[in-house]
Image (spheres, helix red, strand yellow):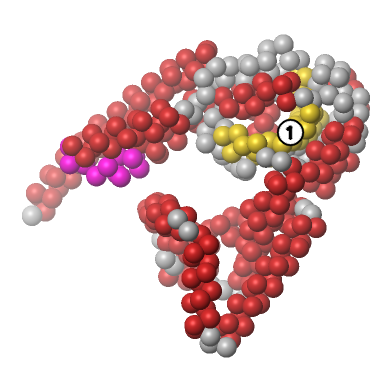
Amino acid sequence: MVQALNLLRDQIDEVDQQLLDLLQQRIQLVHKVGEVKTQHGLPIYAPDREAAMLAKRRAEAENKGVPPALIEDVLRRVMRESYTSEKDSGFKTIKPELGNIVVIGGRGQLGRLFVQMFTLSGYQVDVIGKEDWQQAPELFANAGLVLVSVPINLTESVIAQLGNLPKDCILADITSIKAAPLSKMLAVHQGPVVGLHPMFGPDVPSLAKQVIVYADGRGSEQYQWLLQQMGIWGARLHAVEAESHDKAMTLIQSLRHFTSFAYGMHLAQEDADLKLLLDLSSPIYRLELAMVGRLFAQSPDLYADIIMASDQSTAMIKRYHQHFGQLVELIESKDRAGFIACFERVSQWFGDYSQEFLEESRSLLQQANDSRRS
């Protein structure tokens, strides 16, 4: 039996080697694809092409007796690597006559990412930090784009110093709130203005499929090239009014990060045995715990700024606290019927999204379980 098993394992190893050879060949082809896309200014992420290719491969897999979900999982992981590889080929310069791009705060984590992306796109990029302000007038003189990438609590004071930019220079920021910075930019600069909010962190290997929100300030026709450039990077661009953006961010960012912060603090105060929790955890709890732990591996200043970004955020957190208290009363009173009624109301409110989220989370949990090391 052992000999037969070893023989089969050797055959599997040979097939795995063939897979490696094919993956190497695919990566080499991807590099060539990246070069062609760079020459012609094509985005690295083409959703229609990806969807059609996956549908075709699923059908082919089914005909061969291979689970369609398996080939889709494999190809999605391969494509993620492909997007990262394509990025290294650089991108077409949409606005070659622009002049220089100045990133204020370009040595910060997210600022560095944008410096890298603009550099890969062929632009002259200059960085200004707090120690470089004496060079600012010289750098601004030929600037076609000034991008503000500083902490939230410094954004408006930095923008206030940008009143002497060239008339046609685009002034933009990448702060996680939009209304106040946008208003300040419009007040100090008479040229084109746009507020940006990248909905990702600085550790993403590629901008393919990443969302960048933008709020119009002034001169949209003059900053269209910037949106097009970010689209070539693979980003998904979403236009929104500044006030609507800030209201949504109280839920997407402020409240979400606050609940993670509160749960992490609770674990610490309870002195929970993290190793035991991980050993006993289901995939969903392990994933939730990872999201909480991820928060505390990052900058406390950043999350203090996000959570305390506005009075809207504070009001949202206070309403959450109120609703939390009402639910605690349900539990304390053992009101099972009230709990079920509340559950059903919320389920009805989610509507078809409930089933969609169930299916999406099932895939995420399978991946999380595959990555489990202990």
Q: Nearer the viewer, residue 337 or 36?
A: 337
Horizontal side, residue 372 vs residue 87: left or right? left
Residue at 48% x, 70% y: name it: 344
Residue 323 location in percent, x, y?
Answer: 65, 72
- Quadrant into which the C terminus falls: bottom left
Classify 77 as above or below 343: above
What residue is disc 1 on? 216
Q: Is residue 256 visible?
A: yes
Residue 330 location in percent, x, y?
Answer: 58, 82
Instruction: Please count the marks in the image.
Output: 1
Q: Neighbour class for label 1 at 10 Å: few (<14), some, many (≥20)? A: some
Q: Is residue 297 visible?
A: no
Residue 149 location in percent, x, y?
Answer: 75, 37
Horizontal side, residue 190 vs residue 195: left or right? right
**Residues shaded magenta:** 64-74
Taken as a whole, is the magenta stretch helix, strand or loop? Answer: helix
Residue at 47% x, 15% y: name it: 36
Classify 283 as above or below 50: below
Please tell me whether residue 150 belongs to the stretch shown in magenta.
no
Residue 161 location in percent, x, y?
Answer: 91, 33
The image quarter in which residue 270 lies: bottom right
- Quadrant into which the N terminus falls: bottom left
Question: Mark 1 belongs to which amino acid?
Answer: Asp
Residue at 62% x, 23% y: name it: 229
Q: Nearer the viewer, residue 289 or 157?
A: 157
